[in-house]
Amino acid sequence: MSRKLLLVVFLLGACAYNEPRVPTDALRPVPEVKGKQVAEATGALEAEGFAVIMESSLSGRRLDAQTAKAECPSATVTEQNPAGGENVPKAMTITLTISGCP
């Protein structure tokens, strides 16, 4: 084979290789929960199959959803990661930053 043909075959092979992808039917859009209180935000995310972890904007303390609902029911979500509307695997853990919780 000629060098040009080998180069083309190599480049096509390199372009065809991609890292394994999550099937699109396994992806879900993340609900937008910024501005919502802990119970409402957690409920919306868990209803879509996501796990939730909270982080206090005051202390940086990490809380599971149950603890956050019990200790800080009026806390409000100020940030979320991944952002609302992003398509992610349905079992992904969503991290919420909340205010009003020590």
Image: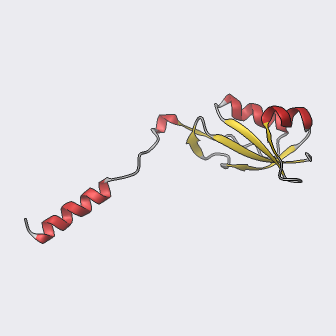
Report the residue that reaches farthest toward the left.
1
* 39 lies left or right of 100: left
- For the image, the number of numbered tags is 0
Report the residue that reaches farthest toward the bottom.
3
For the point 61% across and 47% down, which residue is it? 86
For the point 22% across and 62% down, which residue is it? 10
Q: Could you tell me residue 75's position as x and y percent?
A: 89, 42
* 94 lies left or right of 55: left
Q: Name the image quarter holding residue 89.
A: top right
Q: Could you tell me residue 6's position as x and y percent?
A: 15, 65
Locate the N terminus and report the quarter of the image it occupies: bottom left
For the point 66% across and 40% down, which residue is it? 93
Q: Could you tell me residue 46's position as x and y percent?
A: 70, 31
Q: Name the image quarter holding residue 15.
A: bottom left
Q: Could you tell me residue 45's position as x and y percent?
A: 70, 35
Q: Is residue 6 visible?
A: yes
Q: Is residue 73 visible?
A: no
Coloration mode: secondary structure
* 91 lies left or right of 63: left
For the point 47% across and 41% down, which residue is it? 22
Camera-side residue of 53 and 31: 53
Report the residue that reaches farthest toward the top.
47
Residue 49 vertical placement versus 20 (above, below) = above
Residue 1 vertical placement versus 73 (above, below) = below
Residue 37 vertical placement versus 81 (above, below) = above
